[in-house]
Image (cartoon, rainbow, N blue to C red):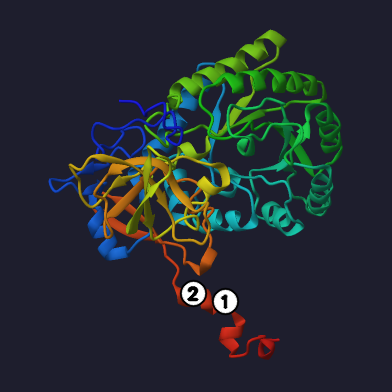
């Protein structure tokens, strides 16, 4: 049954489910199931047991799901590249979700790691990651961050501006004079291809903060090649995020390979990094492209472009983004209040308030992102009711799930689970309204363990020097 056309407040894609307890396979971790009592299980661990032990809100991450996806993506791109006689390196996007445990998982599965700040670099190093398999991004890397990256022997640095180039040149000049190897760098370029995604997520426009226009890149590369402390190894291009399909990558590849071919006149270019940002399913109607099809489509397109120009295919690098960790995550909430609201003459919406919100998932407020939800502590035979899951913050835009059909008897004390929250939820979390950040729990083979400790009110107060000193102004600590 489809949503009634005369109900404009119901999204066109949202349908009334035959079973409001069913778990859409593409949205949930493969280990998600219900026990005989209707309780949600993730990797064999029950939602009620997780609440009793760790409280809510709670980020739950299926370790095997992360490992399996990392392996699947690496193998898909390695196979696609091998068919053309080159290698492919896959980088895990630290910004999607970063902890020392997750870094260990993905590096053990053969992925390199992409970091964008000194903090992310510190986490990767604390996890024991090989510095030579790390890449540093960012449009405003500080001198200290660049110095640290060079000091630890980072695998590559992506140059994003002329100012950054000169900063890095000054840093490496001293080291190369003392006998150190030149620093490998890539140059980020904007292909002008607009990925089929939200405007805020599209990162290849000319008018944006990242990278260089294609026309400006040759001069930047020429300058790098003048500097003995730097080694130009390739171009980098990222066209967006939450992308379905390979068409945008194919068009971008044509433009970037043109530039790559032009730059070959000045010397060898061993690598081409085409970014990634592959999408995942957040709702039952989302249909991400299978990763093997993406890998084949993108690599084949680059190979064709190189063949047309009579140049060798370089080794390739990819940054698949949220697809590694997104589906592996589920957030658990406890329902606090339920309030029916008449939103039109014909339509009533159930407002379901939970004990988290935009502080643990900012994406709906930032991007209008859509999510799904299901009761996690039980199942119900009640008729599905149109619901909006909202948070506890003092903002009307504090929406966790904009529109979903939940059993009409949802009630305070119920556990609610929101899937596909492994990426960009923990990373974007905040203390808005002085709410502590939730813990992150990894589940595997029926066991659960904390991998990131949750905050407490005492943690938040400990940063307030007025509290610590007993002085409202904190003058005693100056």
The answer to whether residue 336 is left or right of residue 474 is left
Q: Looking at the image, which residue is at 57% across and 47% down?
A: 366
- The quarter in which the C terminus is drawn is bottom right
Query: Dot 2 surroundings within 10 Å: few (below 14), some, or many (20 or more)?
Result: few
SS under mark 1 = loop
In this rendering, the answer to whether 63 lies above or below 287 is: below
Q: Position of residue 391 (x, y in %)?
A: 44, 56
> Which quarter of the figure has residue 348?
top left
Q: Label 1 to label 2, Cα distance in Å?
A: 7 Å
Residue 152 visible from this viewpoint: yes
* Furthest residue toward front: 345
The answer to whether residue 38 is left or right of residue 283 is left
Q: Position of residue 349 (x, y in %)?
A: 37, 45
* Furthest residue toward left: 36
Name the residue beneath numbered marker 1. Answer: 463
In this rendering, the answer to whether 352 lies above or below 86 is: below
Could you tell me if the residues under marks 1 and 2 are in contact, i.e. CB atoms within 8 Å?
yes
> Which quarter of the figure has residue 302?
top right
Residue in front for this viewpoint, 346 or 299: 346
Q: Looking at the image, which residue is at 44% across and 72% down?
A: 456
Query: Dot 1 surroundings within 10 Å: few (below 14), some, or many (20 or more)?
Result: few
The answer to whether residue 141 is left or right of residue 101 is right
Name the residue beneath numbered marker 2. Answer: 459
SS under mark 2 = helix
Residue in front for this viewpoint, 37 or 158: 37
- The quarter in which the N terminus is drawn is top left
């Amino acid at each position: 049954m489809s949503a009634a056309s005369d109900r404009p407040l119901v999204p066109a894609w949202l349908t009334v489910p035959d079973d409001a307890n069913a778990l859409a396979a593409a949205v949930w971790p493969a280990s998600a199931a219900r026990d005989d009592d209707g309780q949600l299980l993730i990797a064999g661990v029950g939602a009620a047991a997780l609440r009793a032990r760790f409280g809510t809100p709670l980020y739950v991450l299926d370790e095997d799901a992360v490992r399996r996806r990392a392996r699947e993506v690496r193998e898909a791109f390695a196979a696609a590249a091998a068919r053309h006689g080159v290698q492919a390196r896959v980088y895990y996007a630290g910004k999607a979700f970063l902890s020392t445990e997750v870094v260990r998982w993905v590096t053990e599965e053969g992925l390199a790691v992409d970091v964008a700040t000194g903090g992310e670099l510190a986490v990767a190093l604390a996890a024991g990651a090989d510095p030579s398999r790390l890449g540093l991004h960012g449009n405003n890397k500080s001198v200290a961050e660049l110095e640290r990256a060079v000091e630890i022997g980072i695998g590559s640095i992506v140059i994003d501006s002329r100012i950054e180039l000169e900063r890095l040149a000054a840093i490496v000049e001293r080291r190369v004079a003392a006998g150190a190897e030149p620093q490998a760098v890539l140059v980020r370029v904007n292909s002008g291809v607009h990925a089929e995604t939200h405007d805020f997520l599209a990162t290849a426009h000319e008018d944006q903060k990242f990278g260089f226009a294609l026309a400006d890149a040759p001069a930047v590369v020429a300058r790098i090649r003048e500097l003995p402390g730097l080694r130009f190894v390739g171009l980098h291009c990222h066209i967006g995020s939450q992308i379905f399909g390979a068409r945008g990558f194919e068009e971008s590849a044509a433009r970037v390979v043109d530039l790559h071919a032009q730059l070959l006149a000045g010397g060898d270019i061993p690598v081409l990094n085409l970014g990634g940002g592959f999408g995942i399913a957040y709702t039952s109607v989302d249909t991400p492209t299978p990763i093997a099809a993406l890998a084949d489509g993108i690599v084949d397109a680059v190979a064709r472009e190189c063949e047309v120009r009579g140049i060798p295919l370089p080794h390739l690098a990819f940054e698949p983004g949220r697809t590694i960790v997104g589906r592996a995550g589920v957030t658990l909430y406890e329902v606090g209040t339920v309030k029916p609201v008449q939103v039109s003459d014909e339509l009533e919406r159930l407002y379901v308030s939970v004990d988290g919100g935009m502080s643990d998932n900012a994406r709906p407020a930032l991007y209008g992102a859509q999510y799904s939800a299901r009761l996690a502590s039980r199942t119900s035979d009640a008729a599905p009711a149109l619901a909006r899951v909202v948070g506890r913050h003092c903002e009307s835009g504090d929406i966790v799930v904009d529109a979903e059909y939940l059993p009409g008897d949802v009630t305070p004390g119920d556990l609610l689970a929101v899937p596909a929250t492994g990426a960009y939820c923990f990373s974007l979390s905040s203390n808005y309204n002085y709410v502590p950040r939730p813990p992150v729990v990894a589940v595997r083979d029926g066991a659960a363990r904390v991998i990131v400790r949750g905050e407490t009110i005492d943690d938040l107060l400990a940063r307030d020097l007025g509290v610590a000193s007993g002085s409202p102004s904190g003058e005693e600590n100056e």
